[in-house]
Image (cartoon, rainbow, N blue to C red):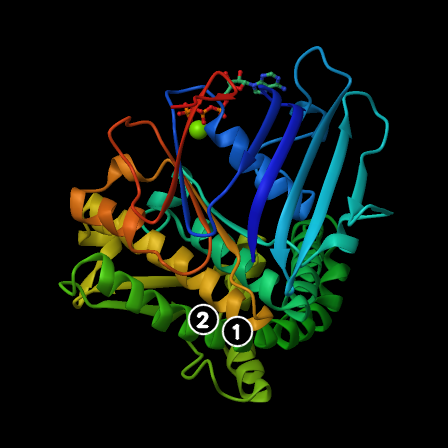
């Protein structure tokens, strides 16, 4: 799939914009605060009805305007399709069209334009805490597997309820009697999560290793390992086995859970680890290696999504170039040849040989 054309009216700092894009790489260059990220936001919103930065959709309406209009032509599902959103500055509900027909919700346009975003915060995900990596993995897996999303939500609900019981039991000891019921449900749903994750991380790791190999000129051997509850010896084991493994771990931590009033065991603590040529990245990786490995993971996620739907999602890379050495920059600019890519950067000297170079200044395209 690719975005051929985008028209914006009163979207963020764009009063009026009409742009056509290359089906390959589109490099968007401009100084700080000129509207580069706003443009990526518009593209991502066009396909999903979700913003990766706005709390409320009215934030995207240009200051002083009543409404914003975001419209684009996409080539997807073997034909040209038109998407359009109108967002109001007031509390009036937003409106969406697909091929000229007004639709009710974002779900009615899903699959037409899928995007995968890589933003500066993602660059250090492999160095940061486990929660950030879980979010990244869960986000990707939820996009791929709706059943996983449902299981994850259910697991979260049971976990919240169990936490509350653990806390309330100091005032009301009798309430602890219902804990075994919650533990059983947690192990059942938890086993399902582990089973999904094992398969997902295996595919993700393999795909990322190929990208990382290209990125590093074959110098670094990327390996990803999924980490879950220690009693789980084989995360690919049948669900019933996983469930028993989880229960065994829970039982050995029951006293500690009661004493601390916290849910100490389960896949809500899962993580994954990346090593490069056998060396643990979190502990020893350089900044550049860490960033490159994170981009490889994003490219891998996009490839898995593409394999699933038959259409490779549009990749949005916000501000990642300045952090990489020239060889790795060249890979991002000139060697991601699959599908459509949008890259923003601040350095005026940068350009891509694989598509179109666009300069943005104060919400306008600079014509050369
Ligand atoms: P950087 O290189 O610093 O990341 P950028 O080019 O990505 O910069 P954007 O984040 O796209 O910059 O934002 C550009 C400008 O848009 C900011 O100065 C911001 O004040 C302005 N802006 C944001 N929302 C609105 C809005 N609703 N109306 C008008 N201007 C807005
Ligand atoms: Mg920006």
Query: Which picture quadrant has residue 66?
Result: top right
Of the residues under marks 1 and 2, which one precedes in the sequence?
1
Query: Which picture quadrant has residue 329?
Result: top left
Mark 1–mark 2 contact, CB under 8 Å?
A: yes
Query: Which picture quadrant has residue 250?
Result: bottom right
**Callout 2 secondary element:** loop
User: Which residue occupies 26% across, 52% down?
Assistant: 331
- Specify whether residue 179 is in view: yes
Cα distance between the residues tagged 1 and 2: 9 Å
Task: Decide if residue 23 is on the left or right side of residue 29.
Answer: right
User: Which residue occupies 25% across, 38% down?
Assistant: 323
**Which percent across, then down, holds residue 182?**
70, 68
Residue under label 2, please give it. 229
**Which percent across, then down, holds residue 142?**
60, 62
**Which percent across, then down, holds residue 75?**
61, 55
Q: From what the image shows, is residue 197 above or below residue 320?
A: below
Q: Residues within 10 Å of mark 1 (few under 14, many from 20)?
A: many
User: Which residue occupies 78% across, 50% down?
Assistant: 99
Q: Nearer the viewer, mark 1 or mark 2?
A: 1
Task: Decide if residue 95 is on the left or right side of residue 359.
Answer: right
**Which percent across, then down, holds residue 269?**
48, 60
Q: Residue lying at the far top in this picture: please name it.
A: 64
Which of the two residues, 333 or 237, is positioned nearer the viewer here? 333
Image quadrant of ligand 2 equals top left
Residue under label 1, please give it. 194
- Quarter the C terminus occupies: top left
- Specify whether residue 270 is in view: no
Q: From what the image shows, is residue 337 above or below residue 69?
A: below
**Callout 1 secondary element:** helix
């Amino acid at each position: 799939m690719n975005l051929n054309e985008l028209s914006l009216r009163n979207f963020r700092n764009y009063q009026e914009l009409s742009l056509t894009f290359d089906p390959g790489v589109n490099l968007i260059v401009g100084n700080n605060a000129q509207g580069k990220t706003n443009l990526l936001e518009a593209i991502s919103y066009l396909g999903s009805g979700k913003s990766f930065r706005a709390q409320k959709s009215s934030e995207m309406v240009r200051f002083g305007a009543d409404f914003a209009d975001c419209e684009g032509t996409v080539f997807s599902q073997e034909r040209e399709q038109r998407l359009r959103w109108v967002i109001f500055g007031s509390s009036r509900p937003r409106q969406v069209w697909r091929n000229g027909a007004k639709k009710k919700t974002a779900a009615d346009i899903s699959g037409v334009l899928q995007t995968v975003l890589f933003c500066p915060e993602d660059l250090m995900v492999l160095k940061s805490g486990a929660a950030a990596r879980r979010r990244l993995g869960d986000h990707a897996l939820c996009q791929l597997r709706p059943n996983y999303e449902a299981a994850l939500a259910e697991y979260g609900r049971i976990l919240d309820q169990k936490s509350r019981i653990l806390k309330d039991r100091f005032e009301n000891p009798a309430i602890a009697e219902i804990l075994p019921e919650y533990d059983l449900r947690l192990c059942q749903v938890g086993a399902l999560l582990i089973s999904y994750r094992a398969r997902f991380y295996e595919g993700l790791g393999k795909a990322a290793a190929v990208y990382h190999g290209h990125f590093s000129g074959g110098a670094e051997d990327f390996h990803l390992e999924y980490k879950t509850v220690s009693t789980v010896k084989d995360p690919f084991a049948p669900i019933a086995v996983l469930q028993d493994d989880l229960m065994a771990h829970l039982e050995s931590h029951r006293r500690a859970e009661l004493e601390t009033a916290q849910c100490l065991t389960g896949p809500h603590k899962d993580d994954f680890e990346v090593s490069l040529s056998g060396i643990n990245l979190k502990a020893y990786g350089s900044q550049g290696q860490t960033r490159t490995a994170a981009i490889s993971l994003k490219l891998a996620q996009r490839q898995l999504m593409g394999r699933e739907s038959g259409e490779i999602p549009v990749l949005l890379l916000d501000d990642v170039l300045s952090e990489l050495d020239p060889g790795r920059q060249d890979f991002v600019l000139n060697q991601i040849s699959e599908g459509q890519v949008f890259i923003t950067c601040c350095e005026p000297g940068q350009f891509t040989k694989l598509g179109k170079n666009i300069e943005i200044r104060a919400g306008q395209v600079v014509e050369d």
